[in-house]
Amino acid sequence: MIELEGLTKRYGTKTAVDRLSFGVRPGVVTGFLGPNGAGKSTTMRMMLGLDRPTAGDVRIDGKHYDQLKDPLNHIGALLEAKSIHGGRTARNHLLCLAQSNGIPTRRVDEVLDLVGLGSVAKKRPSGFSLGMGQRLGIAAALLGDPRILMFDEPVNGLDPEGIHWIRNLMKHLASEGRTVFVSSHLMSEMALTAEHLVVIGRGRLLADTTMESFIEENSRTYVRLRAPEPERLRDVLVADGLAPTEGAEGAIEVEGAQAVRIGELAAEHRLVLHELSPQQASLEEAFMRLTAQTVEYHAHTALPGPGEPAAAPPPGQQQGWGPQQQKEGF
Ligand SMILES: Nc1ncnc2c1ncn2[C@@H]1O[C@H](COP(=O)(O)OP(=O)(O)OP(=O)(O)O)[C@@H](O)[C@H]1O
């Protein structure tokens, strides 16, 4: 379990992390999302004791990072790709880490096999591909068999096979009851991996909820219809208290109604339907919608039309904005 309480980091006049409070629970993969510069890396660095908070607190299993005896046995982390000592082989790199943290040598070979680097254990990481480097970083994170794992952008630059492997590994680690906290810019990937989401913008908490609720609360869900007699269908829907709107390519869209009810209505009125499909936005659309509110609020840029994802905010206006800020009159 990771617990943050009012965690704050200021760099001069810049507040990178602003009174963040949330918990990361074991047993599920928790995704950590936020626009560029939202404060994700700074938060993760403070969790690992690499940056000192200006205010507030972060606890790992109830303790501050520097109070943990043998921290690698409690929390393992993959931060942005680091340079690894050029002269050492992959195995020796892990061996040094293991020895300085009281971890038995056999664990080094175990994790090398686990990440699929067993056959190149005696090679120097300087010749490794990006994917092999990520695997070595993950091997280091797993070395102490920790109950908590943190990955900052683990799939950056990886090929589909590498992405697939990391996704399955994270899910597997969570299924073993570990706490898995992962940041990523790749929304489609996050949607496939995380069950829970923590979203921040401008250093503040925007959402701490399940993936399902996040998409539901930040996107438009509607039913799309196509029919050979659209006018008659519209009249029937309106008579039933619904508010059909025009969708793309002659489709009719209806918010706030179940597809089942619309299907029954059509049948009652002997109307033929060519399409009756519930539509839900992707995580990317929901995230962009939440983020786009910032742009609208500050720069008066138009929100996307029905069913369209929001345009990316222009550079310099990429901070998040959401219910939390609006509530606080930020
Ligand atoms: N050492 C530092 N000195 C001054 N400002 C910093 C420092 N580190 C981070 N910042 C600022 O704090 C804010 C948060 O940065 P951080 O890297 O944590 O964001 P992020 O969400 O990880 O962004 P990205 O997704 O782009 O990696 C940014 O505005 C950044 O410029």
Image (cartoon, grey):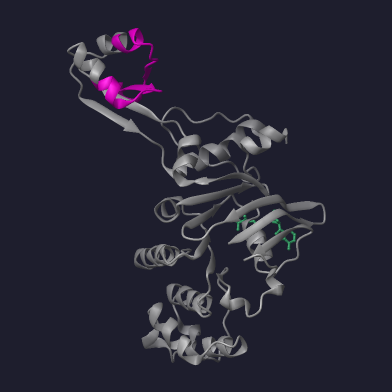
Residue 301 lies, with reference to residue 210, above or below; the image says above
Residue 222, percent across and down?
38, 27
Compared with 162, 285 (above or below) is above
Q: Position of residue 243 (x, y in %)?
A: 40, 15
Percent coordinates x, y for residue 224 in the rendering = 31, 26
Q: Nearer the viewer, residue 219 or 83?
A: 219
Residue farthest toward the front in the current orientation of the protein: 62
Q: Position of residue 45 (x, y in %)?
A: 66, 65
Q: In the picture shown, does residue 112 fall above or below 248?
A: below
In which quadrant will I find the N terminus? bottom right
Which span of residues is magenta-colored? 236-263
Residue 102 appears left or right of 274: right
Furthest toward the right, the residue is 12
Query: Does the stretch in magenta take in 92?
Result: no
Q: Which of the 4 image quadrants contains residue 174?
A: bottom left
Q: For ligand 1, which image quadrant applies? A: bottom right
User: In the rendered view, does 135 fall on the left or right side of 98?
Assistant: left
Residue depicted at x 42% and y 84%: 110
Q: How many marks?
A: 0
Identify which residue is drawn at 52% across, 90% down: 104
Q: Residue at x 56, y 50 (%)?
A: 198
- The C terminus - image quarter: top right
Q: Quadrant of residue 3?
A: bottom right
